[in-house]
Amino acid sequence: MSHPFSSLSPDLVMSAVESLNVWPAGEPFALNSYENRVLMFRDDEGKNWIVKFYRPDRWSDMAIQEEHDFLQELADHQVPVVAPWRDQAGESLHYFKTYRFALFPHCPGQAPELDNPSHLFAMGELLGRLHKVSAKKAFQHRPRLEMVDGILDAQQRVLASNWMTPHQRRAYDRVIDKVHQHLTQHNVPASKMIRCHGDCHLGNVLGRDEQFTLVDFDDCLTAPAIQDIWMLLPTDDPQGWRSYLSEITEGYEETCSFPTEQMSLIEPLRSYRLIRHSAWLVSRWDDPAFPRAFPWLADSGYWDQHIRQLEQQCLQLEHPRWLA
């Protein structure tokens, strides 16, 4: 079966990079990436690069360009991000055959240690600097976070897959209805949303000591500021939330007022992510990379576990961890 990256051979990758007059010294090395295809290579001058091939038909050219321009704006304000390379004409989005791609300087480093208070402070400071800049303008072509509509769309995609038994489908529908009722109570007005990274988990933060850089803005969107913060807070240590949050808040408030009034959105956002994640896996199943990486998705036991997880999340919506 054909899929969006079926013709993306190593030779094509090399030819695409060379079309920009950048010369790989060897064959690019594929990195873990599923939505797009991301590879690393070293050029003939010894510099390491990341080349990213965008999934066809996911984002419009304007949405990708807006991501690139946002990154450049952040870099111009000394926010530690990796802006895409631009050619002599100032273009950052490039085309080769049926693919759109971009080059980024390689950013070395490791994820922060969230049990290290200085790392938490540094992460808070980084996000505060990000949000200070991002609040100055608005996206025109990137999506807006819509939790209620988003989970209904996810529900339809999951049920259309026909992977669940009739009993599982009924249980899934019931728990989605419960989550939906909670999320309708948490509509965020547009005036309270800003440009956000959107997927700020530890895998998208790299650095050493207390110097960190945010990478992979592929999911950047308009959202409440807490969207870039909640994934740094532990789910298995409710009592530890206060100490984690204290360090993050202290760093954040070096440049911005912390969005304390958005804390009630944490569990709704977590619920939204859980539901959307399964729907994303289902919708990408025709890409051979997904069955290889997530074989358990086709197992009935996975859906039993997913439904139980959502039922537990409903309890958290009623009694949030952060109030413990």
Image (cartoon, rainbow, N blue to C red):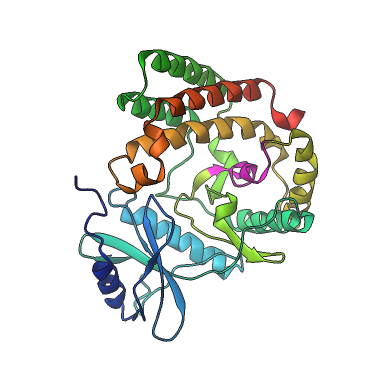
Quarter of the image for the C terminus: give it: top right
Residue 280 visible in the current orientation: no
The percent position of residue 307, horizontal first and vertical second, equals: 50, 23
Q: Residue furthest bottom?
A: 45
Number of labels in the image equals 0
Q: Position of residue 58 (x, y in %)?
A: 32, 48
- Residue found at x 29% / y 68%: 13
Residue pictured at 65% horizontal, 20% vertical: 318
Left/right placement of residue 45 relative to residue 252 reads left
When the figure is inspected, residue 275 is found, relative to residue 13, above or below; the finding is above
**Going by the image, does 2 lie left or right of 291?**
left
Residue for point 55% across, 26% down:
309
Above or below, comparing residue 286 to residue 121 in the picture: above
- Residue 234 in magenta stretch: yes
Q: Quadrant of residue 100?
A: bottom left
Q: Which residues are magenta?
A: 223-235
Of residues 89 and 217, the one nearer the viewer is 217
